[in-house]
Image (spheres, helix red, strand yellow):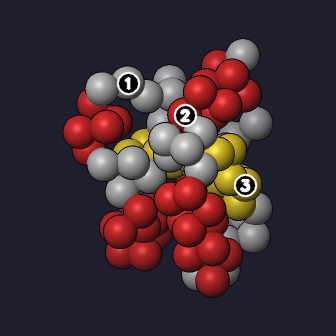
């Protein structure tokens, strides 16, 4: 509850289908853009990509920036099952 869902795929991938309510921040832009989307570092952040590799990288970046509650949902299909039910 209250988590921000961050899709770290490319804008083109995001446009082709996304988790309801997800925010697109490509993995290469996470470092520069996350503070504007999730200013409170105690907010739960759920990251995902197509297969889980880029979201694992994004999780490491977010943890290094001080975000305390970051979970890697892995793939798009898994993220949809978890977030959308």
* Label annotation for residue 17: 1
Q: Nearer the viewer, mark 3 or mark 2?
A: 2
Instruction: Looking at the picture, tell me which residue is in the foreground, 74 or 7.
Output: 74
* Label annotation for residue 76: 2
Callout 1 environment at 10 Å: few (<14), some (14 to 19), or many (20+)?
Answer: few
Q: To which residue does mark 3 refer?
A: 71
Determine whether the residue tagged by mark 3 lies in a helix, strand or loop: strand
Instruction: Looking at the picture, tell me which residue is in the foreground, 29 or 53.
Output: 53
The N terminus sits in image quarter: top right
Determine whether the residue tagged by mark 2 lies in a helix, strand or loop: helix
Residue 58: x %, y % from top left: 54, 65
Locate residue 84 relative to residue 49 in the image: left or right.
right
Residue 43 in view, yes or no: no
Callout 3 environment at 10 Å: few (<14), some (14 to 19), or many (20+)?
Answer: some
Residue 50 in view, yes or no: yes
Reading the chain from its start, which is encountered first: label 3 or label 2?
3
Reading the chain from its start, which is encountered first: label 3 or label 1?
1
Which residue appears at 63% of the width and 74% of the height? 60
């Amino acid at each position: 509850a209250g988590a921000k869902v961050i899709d770290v795929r490319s804008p083109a991938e995001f446009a082709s289908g996304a988790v309801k309510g997800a925010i697109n921040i490509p993995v290469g832009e996470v470092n520069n853009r996350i503070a504007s989307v999730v200013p409170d570092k105690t907010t739960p952040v759920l990251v995902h990509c197509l297969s889980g590799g880029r979201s694992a990288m994004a999780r490491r970046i977010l943890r290094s920036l001080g975000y305390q509650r970051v979970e890697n949902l892995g793939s798009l299909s898994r993220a949809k099952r978890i977030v959308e039910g």
